[in-house]
Image (cartoon, coloured by chain):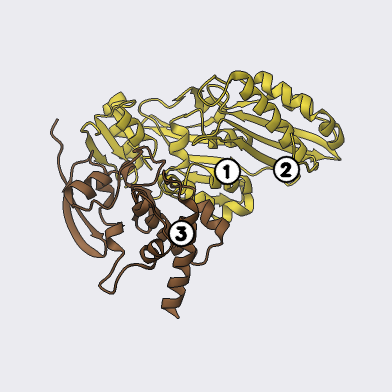
Amino acid sequence: MIAPFILHQAESLEQASSLLSEHGEEARVLAGGSELILLLKMGLAAAKHVVNIKTIPGLARLKYDAGAKALKIGALVTHRALEKSALVREHFPLIVEMEKQLANVRIRNVGTLAGNISFAEPHADPGTLLTAYGAKVKVRSIAGERALSMGDFFVDYYQTALKSDELVTEIEIPKPAENCDGVYLRYCPGERPMVGVAAFLEWKNGACANARVALGCVGPTPIRATEVEQSLAGKARAEILAEAERLGEKAADMSQPLEDVWGSVEYKRQIVKTLVARGLAKLCGERRNHA
Amino acid sequence: MPETSIPLKFRLNGQECRAEAAPSDLLIDFLRDRLNLTGTKRSCDIEICGACTVLLDGKAVSSCSVFAFEVDGKEVLTIEGLATTDGLHPLQQAFIDCGGFQCGFCTPGMIMLAKSLLDENPDPTADQIRDYMDANICRCTGYQMIIESIQRATELIKSRQA
């Protein structure tokens, strides 16, 4: 049973923003509902006012801005829409890979990408990959709009930088350079991922010119493994392959997993090490089916 | 705090339907308790098991985690809407023919999820069936027969269309 609430069917972003401003902490935004309804049912969130934004036209827009070379994902775009989009498949194949594995098809049919990150559930796939992509989150309130990096958006376990009167309107993902390879790997023994690793390596003259490595589910928020990224810069594929295990260890040291029913801290760090090493091996061309 | 009821107009199993729901009513309770459609089952209540699967505008959803008011203007299909005066739906017949259930509790959800699979992909491979049906849980673990039932249903549908 969900405690009774007053439903507001917002007709515009302006109206949604002013409702959120008026009701503050007592209001919650409803998009797909797959996170919100669970939390309301379990009593982990309370809402006296629910602001339905599904009634706002235009928020389900998904488009690739060829000029800005960026994918623009409206707040109502579902996981399933991203999984099935030919446009996303062409320019951002890793998004499709990630979405195909996310939860189950019933959740992907209703759940939105913007909603997923807005709850900052630490055991989730999208935040890790978006962090590695260098995505930006556009949020708005009656005071105006602002854009946040993923690093600034995620604050702590289940906590974002969103103020009580703000909502996410769009997620913008820059297209990686032509000479950039990416990988997303996850370990998911249950319903939610235990570890997620995303990496992009940009190549120039046979060496890694730029590296972005993100670790997810192993700390309060997804993080960039900056020390690993620095070690990758300037190295050739063969050098990276030779160091993959060591770089995996370095990433594991940076992770801050919690012990839970799925595994100990040591076990999860071992998975981080394995996935980072495996991801680097994949990006540097070594095919292997062990480790 | 008394909730204001919301008038809803939607299509339910092919028929026009008008009803009212409170904002906090969940679709599963609305179907089972208000409309007496008890074929849809509640089990995990957290969007994992799929026993409560129904189709909303043709898409499989967990009715345990969708608000009832969201059906307004939409099309809802439950297990009760599959059979016609001509008989059972091919999926229902195939689940009987192949023993695609043991206790039967997951069956309505399995059949509704299989319906959405076959609507998207009328001729799935066994791997595609496994991948899609991975969303729903059978606690009796009769998965192999469920996969066979869906394969059988694709044949039945093809032969009816021929």
Query: On the same chain: label 2 and label 1?
Result: yes
- Vertical position of residue A254 compared to residue A65: above or below: above
**Camera-nearest label, 3 or 1:** 3
The chain assigned the colour yellow in the figure is A
The answer to whether marks 3 and 2 mark residues whose Cβ atoms lie closer than 8 Å is no
Residue at the (44%, 32%) spot, across then down: A118
- Colour in which chain B is drawn: brown
The chain containing the residue under callout 1 comes to A
Q: Secondary structure at mark 1?
A: helix
- For label 2, the residue is A181
- For label 3, the residue is B117
Residue A98, disc: 1
Q: Quadrant of residue A254?
A: top right
Residue B116 shows in this picture: yes
Residue at the (30%, 45%) spot, across then down: A11
* Distance from Cα at disc 3 to Cα at disc 2: 33 Å
